[in-house]
Amino acid sequence: MAERFRTSIENLIHSVIYKKITSEGYAFFQVDELTEIFIDFILFQEGLVHDRRFNDESSPDKYLMGKTMSQDRAEEIESYLNAIFTEWATEESKAYCPRTLYSLEDMLVDYLKKKENELDDVNPKIVSFDNSWHKIRFEKLLKQIYPFFQNLLNGTGFFSEFCIVFQFFVKFRQELVESAREPCRTSKLTIGLRENRSHMREYFNRHVMDVIFSRRCDAIVNAMFDDSCFGGDNEAKPSNRLNLKLGEELEYDVKNEDSDTEGRLCHIFSSLLKETGMSSRTITDRRGVRHGFDDRFTVVSFYDTSAWFEINCTPYHPDDERAKLSFEKVIEVIDTMRNSGLIDYSSGHKHVDALSATQGDTGVLLAMESEVQRNPFLLRAFGNNDRILQRNEAKWYKTFADYNPDMKPFAVERLNRIIERYNKKIEENYIEKPNHKGGTHSEKKERLEEFARFYSQLVHMTTIDPEIMGKYTAMSLLHITGARGVNRLSTLEFRFFRCPKTVQEIELINQFLHAWFGYIHQCREDKIPLQPVPEDIKSCKDYTAEEVQLKTIEYLSKLGLNPEEYRCFWGEVRDIPSATD
C-alpha cells in the first residue's frame, strides 16, 4: 500500500502544476522523506502503521504485522489524494503568482478534511482591514492548524495528537471564525481559545491537553530518575556545590512618559554613569551602549516600552566583586534620577542560569515549581505588596492561585499528577538505587529543555493563557527553550521580586535564591516526597498582612536564613482596604 500510494502521489505531482512537495517545518527532510511521512500518516489512519512523531526518522518496524487494506479502501484513499492535489492546483492557478510547491503541512490538513468529509458549512466573517473588506473563512483557518500544533508541542507531536487537535478545531469551527481578527499578530486559533466562545478552552483542556499530558507525563518523571543527579556516598552533596550564575532586569516606571523624548533617559543614565568611572565599552548591543570598568562585567540601559526604563547586566556570580562595585555605581545613578523625578521603582526580575541552579536535574525544576505554587504569599513578601493590592500586578508574575478560573483546576491537577508519580518513584527508589550516569553539559541542557517545553505548554499553558501572558508566571521556564517573543537564554526567570533599592537588597535576593536551591537539592538528595498543591489554594491577595509576614518569617527560617535581614522586603507588607470598604 505504501508503494502504491507513493506512485500515486508522484504521478499527481507530474500531472498538475507542482514541482515537488516541500515543508516549512521540516527543511532538513528531503522530498522522498516528506512523502514518506505523509504516506505513514495515511496508513496510521488506517491502522497499518505505529503512531510516531512527525520529526522522527522512519523506522523499519513501523508497520503493524498482519494488517491489510481492501482494494476498495485503497481506491477510496487514492480518490482523496487525487481530489486534494487537483483542488490545490485549481486554486493556485487563479493566483497572480501560482506556487508550485505543495507543503506537507497543507497536505495533512487537506487530506483529513477530505477524509472526514467535513463540509465548509461555516458562515464567513466579514471584517474591515486596510481600507477594504475581507472574508475570513474556516478553510483558511484550517491552514493554521498544523503551525498551531507545532507551536503547542514544539515540533514533537505525534500523528495521533495532530488528529486530536484537528478534530477539536473542526468541532468549534464556527466559533473560531467568529473570534478571528484582522490584522492578527498571533494565530487566529490561539485568539479563539483566549476568547473562549462556547467554553471551548475548557473543552480543549479536557479533551486535547489532558490526553497529550497523560501520554507524556510518565516519561518526564522517569527521566528524573533514569539519569539521576543523586550523588554517591563519598561525593559532595549538590547543595554544597552550588555556584549560581545570575542576571538582572532592573525595571523602573517612567514618571512622565508623554514628555520623554526617545532615548533621553538612556542618555542621562550613560552620562551620569561615566561620571562614576564606568566608561562605555566596545561591546556592541542592539539595546544600547554597554558600560563597565572593563569588558568582563557590563550594564546596558534601554526602554522595555515607553512606560518602562530597564537596566540589564552580563551574567555574574554572587562573589564577583566587580559586579558588586558596578551595581553600587548603578544604584547611585538611579537614586539621582529618582530624586530628579524621572523614574521610580518597578520590577526586579532575577535570571538564574538553569544549569548552575539545577545541575541538569529536572527534579529540581519540579520541586521548585511545587514550592512556588504552594506558597503564593511569597509574591507579596518581596516588596510588591502595594502594587499587587492596588494595581492587580500579580497578573505579571502569577501563580496557579491567580489563574483564570477555567484554567486553574487543570494546572493544579496536572502538577499534582506529576508530583504523585514523582513520589511513587521516590518510594520505589528506596528499594532500587538509581543509576549515576551524570551526563555532559549539552545532555543536561537537553533534559532541562525537554521538561521546560512539557511544563510550559501543558501545565503553565502558555499558549492558551487568556491574559496573553505566556511568560508572566512567578517562575517562568520559557527562557530555557525560547518562545515567540521570548529570548532563549537558558535561564529561569523569577519575576516576583521588587526592583532592589540597594546593592544589599540585590545580595539578599541572591542569598535567598542560593538557600532556596540548596534546600531543594538537599530534599532531592534525601529523597523527600513533594507536597501537592491544595485544590483550593488561595490567591496572594487573599492573605492578610499578618499572614504574609508570619508565613514569610517561617519560610525564611526553614531555609536557614535570618528573617530580620529581609525586613526591608516583608516589612513593607500591609493591608490596603478596597475602595468599597
Image: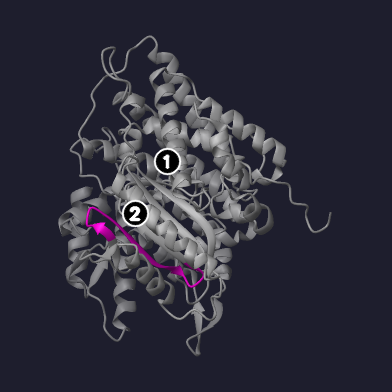
Q: Residue at x 57, y 73 (%)?
A: 123
Is residue 486 among what the camera can see? no
Q: Name which quarter of the figure residue 212 lies in.
A: top left
Is residue 494 among what the camera can see? yes
With respect to residue 52, does 268 lie above or below? below
User: Residue 37 at x, y = what percent?
Assistant: 25, 51
Please state the extent of the stretch shown in magenta in the rendering.
Answer: 292-308
Nearest to the observer: residue 129 or residue 339: 339
Q: Residues within 10 Å of mark 2 (few under 14, many from 20)?
A: many
Which residue is labeled 1 in the image? Answer: 510
Nearest to the observer: residue 28 or residue 159: 28
Q: Name which quarter of the figure residue 256 lies in.
A: bottom right
Which numbered disc flags the more N-terminal residue, 1 or 2?
Answer: 2
User: Residue 483 at x, y = what percent?
Assistant: 37, 56
User: Residue 419 at x, y = what percent?
Assistant: 49, 28
Q: Amino acid at mark 2?
A: Ser
Nearest to the observer: residue 82 or residue 285: 285
Was residue 360 drawn as part of the magenta stretch in this picture? no
Question: What's the CA distance linking mark 1 and mark 2?
Answer: 16 Å
Q: Residue at x 31, y 24 (%)?
A: 228
Q: Name which quarter of the figure residue 64 lies in.
A: top left
Was residue 307 drawn as part of the magenta stretch in this picture? yes
**Under tag 1, what secondary structure?**
helix
Quarter of the figure with the C terminus:
bottom right
Q: Residue at x 64, y 46 (%)?
A: 572
Residue 459 relative to residue 322: left or right: right
Which residue is labeled 2 in the image? Answer: 326
Nearest to the observer: residue 112 or residue 318: 318
Q: Amino acid at mark 1?
A: Asn
